[in-house]
Image: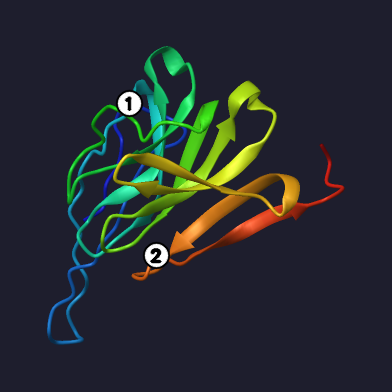
Amino acid sequence: MLVLNNKCAARCAFAAVAACAAAPVHAATYAIQDLGTLGGSYSVAYGINASGQAVGEAYLANDAADRAFRTAANGMITPPSLGTLGGTYSFAYGINDSGQTVGTSYTAGDLSEHAFRTTATGLADLGTLSGSYSYAKAINASGQTVGYSATFGDFT
């Protein structure tokens, strides 16, 4: 499945899954599906799991802010977004086969960004290594998360 957003000209959310034939002489085939947006002009997908759930960022209505999203399996972006850690913006980068999602969100006042992992009740703030920002980029089946963080003395 190759997924494109028809509402944007510059950046589009997409996910691709090749359906390969049993014989290696056959070319892979793809289907196109629009992921949509959260009401704004664009969306970008950064990760996909085996069930076809995609994660990324999408503008809210009137392009007010980027927010993290997670689709249903082989589905479109549906409001609400995944939310934030108190700030204006959030971005989802990775998803495991259980649907646990990781990314980064601005905190209150938009002065720093913290890595997050989704829980049953929202976003869990993963903190930083004493710096002003951290990013979670991938998550495995056990919920272990990888990414990067600033340490004390970063550019804050």
Give the image location of residue 156, x and y in percent: 81, 36
* The N terminus: image quadrant: bottom left
Density class for disc 1 (Cα within 10 Å; few <14, some 14-19, many ≥20) is many
Task: Tell me which residue sits at (60%, 25%) in the image.
Answer: 108
Looking at this view, name the residue that lies furthest to the right: 153
Tag 1: residue type?
Leu
Residue to which mark 2 is pinned: 143
Task: Tell me which residue sits at (17%, 79%) in the image.
Answer: 26
Give the image location of residue 20, x and y in percent: 18, 75
SS under mark 2:
loop
Tag 2: residue type?
Gly
Residue to which mark 1 is pinned: 38
Give the image location of residue 35, x and y in percent: 26, 38
- The tag earlier along the polypeptide, 1 or 2, is 1
Q: Is residue 107 left or right of residue 118?
A: right
Looking at this view, name the residue that lies furthest to the left: 22
Q: Is residue 112 left or right of residue 64?
A: right
Give the number of the mark in front: 1 or 2.
2
Q: Nearer the viewer, residue 147 or 77?
A: 147
Task: Tell me which residue sits at (39%, 34%) in the image.
Answer: 43
